[in-house]
Image (cartoon, rainbow, N blue to C red):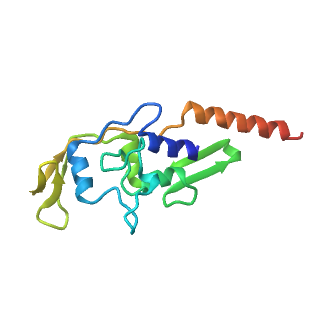
Amino acid sequence: MRNDFREQFRAGGIPKAWATLSPNTVAAKRGMGLPGKSAKGRIFWRLKQQGEYGPASILIATGALRDSYGVKGAKGHIEKIDPAKNELVIGSALKIAQYHQYGTPGPYRIAPVAKKALAFMTSGGWTIRRSVMHPGLRARPVVVTDYAKSKMVEAMQRWLEGATL
C-alpha cells in the first residue's frame, strides 16, 4: 500500500487524476520557492509528478505529505495492524491530509490572527488584504486502489498457504 500511495503522488492521482491547482496556488508556491531543491540546487526525484517538477505539482510542495502516506517512519505516517479487529490502517496523521482527502466546505473567510492584514502571492503578484474569502478545497483523495487490494489478497493467500492448523 505504501508503494501504491507513493505512485498516486507521482501520477497526480489514481485511478482518477486530482483536480488541478488554481493559478493563485501555483503562483503562491512559486513565490515561496516550492517545491524545494537540495542545497546544491538539485531536484529531489520524489517531488516530481508525471515526470515534471514545479509549482503546478498537485499535493507536492516539500514531500512531507507524500512521505506521511508512503514512507514508514516518516512524520505523520500511520501504520497499525490489529489482528484482534482484523484491521490494517495505513495513512497520514498530518492535519493537512484530511483537508485534501475530503475537501473543505467553501467559501470561508480567512482573517489574520496576530497581524492587521494578510499578505500572499497570487497570479497577479503580491496582495495585501484584511481578510479573504477562500473558495474551499476540492477533495484530492489518496485511495486504496484495486491493484493494491489485489496485492493484499495475494499476500494473504500466500500467508494462509504457509499457515498450519
User: Image quadrant for the N terminus?
Assistant: top right
Q: Residue at x 59, y 32 (%)?
A: 147
Residue 143: horizontal and vertical position, in percent?
Answer: 49, 37
Q: Residue at x 15, y 67 (%)?
A: 115
- Horizontal placement of 77 versus 130: left or right? right
Please name whichever residue, 55 or 159, is drawn nearer the observer in this view of the structure. 55
Residue 134: horizontal and vertical position, in percent?
Answer: 20, 45
Please name whichever residue, 71 or 108, is drawn nearer the observer in this view of the structure. 71
Q: Quadrant of residue 106?
A: top left
- Horizontal placement of 123 versus 25: left or right? left
Residue 98: horizontal and vertical position, in percent?
Answer: 40, 47
Asked if residue 32 shows in the view, the reply is yes
User: Image quadrant for the C terminus?
Assistant: top right
Q: Residue at x 22, y 58 (%)?
A: 31
Q: Is residue 106 above or below residue 109?
A: above
Q: Quadrant of residue 18?
A: top left
Q: Residue at x 47, y 31 (%)?
A: 15
Q: Is residue 16 above or below residue 63?
A: above
Residue at the extreme right: 165
